[in-house]
Image: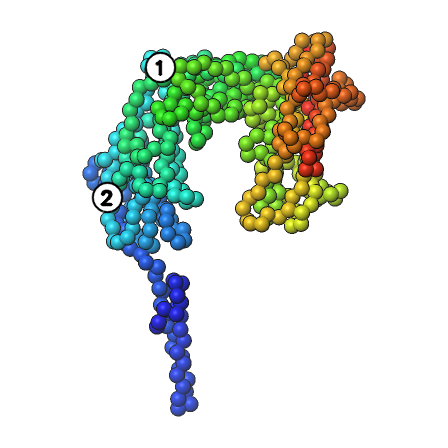
């Protein structure tokens, strides 16, 4: 059979031969599987004891060449495995869990398969990972490691170690230093805690030229930035936690030490790498110790030797439009991601809630109604044509969780059409943020006036602003009165002691989009 008629197409070719004569017909079939250029890859696994390794988990991903190829091996009966793979460059990740505890990680970032090839994966080539701090009273309470290898859009990522220590964890790179065109990332994170007052978070790596073959460092005073994380609470008797999230992976190792809210904790942050990138996160816990409110600050580069204070959870709580927020469309499907309870400092917020109702209208016709807190969990089917949509939501939470921001109403009008490709398309939304410098207990001095900035985010920001109106209510939203905006600020009278104020912002952009945000119990007088 001549498969050359198929040009560059590989796969199964079939043929039928029919012979006739003497009043009889005979049919014969034939098939040929024309294989893409492929080679044998033999993997020999060796454990720490020098014996054949039978418990390695191994994953291969083809980084170059037409088509995507991946293979996964969950152990080996003999310690040797032979694979038949298409020609190309492969990333290989292999991990061996040891009965004595710990694991061995071996990674080859670019294995060129251009001929029959054999590779030995020997756990004896790994070296230990050790990270320590000079504070003798601090105990390691968390450790994590993550590695990624990629060329263009093809990448392989593993968080291959997550524990309370690095005991028994060993690593090695196979092959040469960073191969041409390959992006390597290898990160190590460790956390140490003295008590509820102090936490150390240290990291190493990031974008590297060679993956770690073991690592060892003791971090000292000169390596740290000192960051005080202060967490607000508008209800009494609550406790909370703070922790630092590290690097691109946003590794969260948690904390074993809650403290009374409002309250603060000191974090010492260090990175053995190009930048000391961290984000602080604070949570409020319920009586059972479960998170009921959480706030995450934007990532910052905290330089060694500097001091900072990060405030988390202060009012006014309202929707935030920063980063990956807005309406997302893929084909004829919409979803919304808007952190509705983000705090007054611009930190992304998450909250338990009592009720939520979200509707989507196309023009004046309601096409969807769901209990959607706009966290990207719900989808709405829409038509392909360009149309105007209105997304509206009303969400409430128990005043026993938070006395401020007990109800938030918001709506957005925007246009959307089916994208030209199957890729997800984002439509930014506008919002209004209220910058009152509310105390950590959710109050401002009663009977006084407060002047604070009003910030517009999204398409209506800057030169995109067509109109902005601010209103206040002192009777729970029954009646409203305007608060004129002057040079980006408004002046309002603070409510009486024990009473609250509601704030509303309505904005329109120059492209026809609108937004309205109403925050009930924005803050209290004291």
Q: Residue at (44%, 20%) from the top-left corner? A: 302
> Mark 1 near mark 2, Cβ–Cβ under 8 Å?
no
Classify mark 2: helix, strand or loop.
strand
Q: Residue at (56%, 26%) from the top-left corner? A: 348
Eyeballing the image, is 165 above or below 425?
A: above
Where residue 478 appears, as percent x and y from the top left, is 79, 22
How far apart in space, not on screen, are marks 1 and 2 (Cα)? 42 Å
Q: Is residue 288 visible?
A: no
Among the 4 quarters of the image, the one containing residue 363: top right
Where residue 130 appears, as percent x and y from the top left, is 30, 24
Instruction: Locate residue 491 relative to residue 179 in the image: left or right.
Output: right
226, 251: nearer the viewer = 226
Among the 4 quarters of the image, the one containing residue 164: top left
Image depth: mark 1 or mark 2 in front: 1
Q: Is residue 326 visible?
A: yes
Instruction: Locate residue 385 relative to residue 153 in the image: left or right.
Output: right
Instruction: Locate residue 279 relative to residue 367 in the image: left or right.
Output: left
How many numbered marks have been drawn onto this rendered protein structure?
2
Q: Earlier in the sequence, mark 1 or mark 2?
A: 2
Q: Which mark is residue 120?
A: 2
* Residue situated furthest left in the rendering: 50
Residue picked out by circle 1: 222
Q: Which mark is residue 264?
A: none
Q: Residue at (29%, 48%) from the top-left corner? A: 112
């Amino acid at each position: 059979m001549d498969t050359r008629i198929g040009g560059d197409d590989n796969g199964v070719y079939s043929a039928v031969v029919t012979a006739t004569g003497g009043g009889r017909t005979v049919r014969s079939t034939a098939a040929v599987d024309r294989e893409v250029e492929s080679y044998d890859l033999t993997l020999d696994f060796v454990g720490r004891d020098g014996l054949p390794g039978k418990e390695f988990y191994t994953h291969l991903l083809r980084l170059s060449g037409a088509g995507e190829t991946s293979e996964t091996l969950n152990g080996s009966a003999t310690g040797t495995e032979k694979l038949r793979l298409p020609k190309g460059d492969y990333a290989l990740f292999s991990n061996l869990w040891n009965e004595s505890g710990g694991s061995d990680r071996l990674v080859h970032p670019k294995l060129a398969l251009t001929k029959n090839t054999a590779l030995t994966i020997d756990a004896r080539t790994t070296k230990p990972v050790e990270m320590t701090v000079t504070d003798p009273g601090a105990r390691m309470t968390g450790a994590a490691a993550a590695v990624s290898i990629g060329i263009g859009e093809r990448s392989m990522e593993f968080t291959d170690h997550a524990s309370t220590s690095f005991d028994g964890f060993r690593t090695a790179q196979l092959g040469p230093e960073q191969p041409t065109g390959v992006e390597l990332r290898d990160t190590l994170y460790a956390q140490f805690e003295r008590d509820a007052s102090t936490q150390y978070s240290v990291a190493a790596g990031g974008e590297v030229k060679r993956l770690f073959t073991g690592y060892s460092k003791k971090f000292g005073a000169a390596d740290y930035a000192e960051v005080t994380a202060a967490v607000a609470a508008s209800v009494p008797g609550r406790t909370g936690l703070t922790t630092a999230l590290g690097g691109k992976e946003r590794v969260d190792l948690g904390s074993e030490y809650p403290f009374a809210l409002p309250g603060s904790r000191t974090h010492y942050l260090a990175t053995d790498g190009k930048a000391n990138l961290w984000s602080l996160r604070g949570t409020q816990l319920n009586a059972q110790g479960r998170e009921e409110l959480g706030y995450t600050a934007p990532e910052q580069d905290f330089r060694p030797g500097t001091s900072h204070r990060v405030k988390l959870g202060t009012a006014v709580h309202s929707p935030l439009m920063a980063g990956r927020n807005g309406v997302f469309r893929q084909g004829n499907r919409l979803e919304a991601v808007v952190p509705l309870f983000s705090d007054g400092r611009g930190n992304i917020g998450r909250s338990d809630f009592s009720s939520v109702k979200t509707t989507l209208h196309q023009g004046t016709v309601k096409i969807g109604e769901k209990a959607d807190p706009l966290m990207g969990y719900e989808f709405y089917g829409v038509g392909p044509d360009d149309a105007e949509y209105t997304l509206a939501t009303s969400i409430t939470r128990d005043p026993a969780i938070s006395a401020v921001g007990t109800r938030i109403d918001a709506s957005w009008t925007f246009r959307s059409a089916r994208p030209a490709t199957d890729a997800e398309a984002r439509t930014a939304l506008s919002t209004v943020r209220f910058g009152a410098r509310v105390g950590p207990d959710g109050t401002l001095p009663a009977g006084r006036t407060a002047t604070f900035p009003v910030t517009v985010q999204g398409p209506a920001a800057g030169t995109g602003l067509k109109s902005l109106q601010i209103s206040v209510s002192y009777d729970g939203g029954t009646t409203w009165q305007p608060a004129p905006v002057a040079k980006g600020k408004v002046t309002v009278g603070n409510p009486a002691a024990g009473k609250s104020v509601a704030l509303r912002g309505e904005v329109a952009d120059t492209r026809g989009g609108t937004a309205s945000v109403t925050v009930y119990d924005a803050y209290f007088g004291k």
